[in-house]
């Protein structure tokens, strides 16, 4: 066998491979002999017909095609092993004319080589520069405590005018130029006046109204509103108040703490809140620093991202976006409709970043021998499965679960290793 190779971009190669007559015959002859042995000719028992007669009845083109398929498969495997390539996409094959033997071209993509550079130095620098102490102030604890109290508030229907802090049961419709607006109409049965969760000016127009009132007013949306098509837009609202409810908050004492089930005192409750906020902030801070480390390592690394990897990642991102868009539209939210081509173009930078991140994590794990053990993968798989419903677990692909769990454990090992460099 002889071959020539041409290195292309995106970790792909063009090969031209030639097998001489004897080499190709090693693939062709056994298939031809097998086909001859299976020929059925009238008047002869299977396998007893004269070879010359049986040979004429063989579909030689079909035998040749199968011999080519096996020869190409075996030859590319041999070349890949010799070159230490891992082929990651179905090769494109073109059989060339040849007077004897077999000659073909192959275009294939291999798992890329990743040169990490001095990644330990870059990771350590980020850890030193970005390290911050996580702090929790009393306001954060008080705000969380208020939320807990509000979640346990008792509601009592009242006949008086609504005031700040009351809860409203109401229907509302928003129109602009006589047309109903997506996301500006609906029913709310637990709308808290004064929470400021809707457009500025909306709640103020409801204060002073009671059950049964029908209220009409106009609100101009802020110039920096999150939805661009609503900025500076004047919207007419029609609201029907179905009920006004006064909230009575429980008293913050040890009895209230005990009612939550696992605390004896307010002090224990506050400590639990502080610990929870601290953990949440610590996790976010750890994630922020980890992303910074990977960004710096990628910045100084050299890799040739394969096109199949990029397209596979883009496929997943497009599918996730389409599912999110569909769910949002069903909930009444307006989402920008992009063509698949425009969406892929918009998501391509993120997809490249995702592929680069995975390649870096894989290479570090390989270089530092940080592969997960079977018990570690099994434990992670169980943990993930426990977060799913029984219906979801029924359709769970075991191989996908294993791959996901393996990747999760391996990535954690890599980040633990990087964080140990400080």
Image (spheres, rainbow, N blue to C red):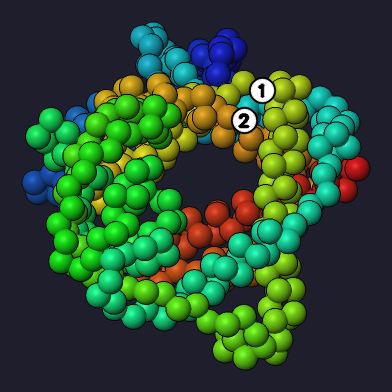
Q: Which mark, residue 420?
A: none
Quarter-wise, where is residue 319 in the image? top left
For the residues labelled 2 and 1, the Cα–Cα distance comes to 8 Å
Q: Nearer the viewer, residue 253 or 135?
A: 253
Mark identifier at residue 356: 2
Q: Residue 190: horizontal and vertical position, in percent?
A: 33, 66
At 30% across and 33% down in the image, what residue appears?
Answer: 220
Viewer-nearest residue: 70 or 344: 344
Q: Position of residue 29 (x, y in %)?
A: 40, 32
- Tell me, yes or no, whether the two marked residues, 2 and 1, touch with CB atoms within 8 Å: yes
Q: Which residue is mark 1?
A: 303
Q: Where in the figure is residue 193, as x and y percent of width and height?
A: 38, 59
Depth-wise, is mark 2 or mark 1 nearer the camera?
Answer: 2
In the structure shown, which secondary structural element does the residue marked by tag 1 occupy? strand
In the rendered view, would you say 368 is above or below 260?
above
Residue count near mark 1 (Cα–Cα under 10 Å), binned few <14, some 14–19, many ≥20: some
> In terms of secondary structure, where does tag 2 sit?
helix
* Image: 321 above or below 370: above
Q: Residues within 10 Å of mark 2 (few under 14, many from 20)?
A: many
User: Which residue is rendered at x = 45% and y = 69% of the image?
Assistant: 388
């Amino acid at each position: 066998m002889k071959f020539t190779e041409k290195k292309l971009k995106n970790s792909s190669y063009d090969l031209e491979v030639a097998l001489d007559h004897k080499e190709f015959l090693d693939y062709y002859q056994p298939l031809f002999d097998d086909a001859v042995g299976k020929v059925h000719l009238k008047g002869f028992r299977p396998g007893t017909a004269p070879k010359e007669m049986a040979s004429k009845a063989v579909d030689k083109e079909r035998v040749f095609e199968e011999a080519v398929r096996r020869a190409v498969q075996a030859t590319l495997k041999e070349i890949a092993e010799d070159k230490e390539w891992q082929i990651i996409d179905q090769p494109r094959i073109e059989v060339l004319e040849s007077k004897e033997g077999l000659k073909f071209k192959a275009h294939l993509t291999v798992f890329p080589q990743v040169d990490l550079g001095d990644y330990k130095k870059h990771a350590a620098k980020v850890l030193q520069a970005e390290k911050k102490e996580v702090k929790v102030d009393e306001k954060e604890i008080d705000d969380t405590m208020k939320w807990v109290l509000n979640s346990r508030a008792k509601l009592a229907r009242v006949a008086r005018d609504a005031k700040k802090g009351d809860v409203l049961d109401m229907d509302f419709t928003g129109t602009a130029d006589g047309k109903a607006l997506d996301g500006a109409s609906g029913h709310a049965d637990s709308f808290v006046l004064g929470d400021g969760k809707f457009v500025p000016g909306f709640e103020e127009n409801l204060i002073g109204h009671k059950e049964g009132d029908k209220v009409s007013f106009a609100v101009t949306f802020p110039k920096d509103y999150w939805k661009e098509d609503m900025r500076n837009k004047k919207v007419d609202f029609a609201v029907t108040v179905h009920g006004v409810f006064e909230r009575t908050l429980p008293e913050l004492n040890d009895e209230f703490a005990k009612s939550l089930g696992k605390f004896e005192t307010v002090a224990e409750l506050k400590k639990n809140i502080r610990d929870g906020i601290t953990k949440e902030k610590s996790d976010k801070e750890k994630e922020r620093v980890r992303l910074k480390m990977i960004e710096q390592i990628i910045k100084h690394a050299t890799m040739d991202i394969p096109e199949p990897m990029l397209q596979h990642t883009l496929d997943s991102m497009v599918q996730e976006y389409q599912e999110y868009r569909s769910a949002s539209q069903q909930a009444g939210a307006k989402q920008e409709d992009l063509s698949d081509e425009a969406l892929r173009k918009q998501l391509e930078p993120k997809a490249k970043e995702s592929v680069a991140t995975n390649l870096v994590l894989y290479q570090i794990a390989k270089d530092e021998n940080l592969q997960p053990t079977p018990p570690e993968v099994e434990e992670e798989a169980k943990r993930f499965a426990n977060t799913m419903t029984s219906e979801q677990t029924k359709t769970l692909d075991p191989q996908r679960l294993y791959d996901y769990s393996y990747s999760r454990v391996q990535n954690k090992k890599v980040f633990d290793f990087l964080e140990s460099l400080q």
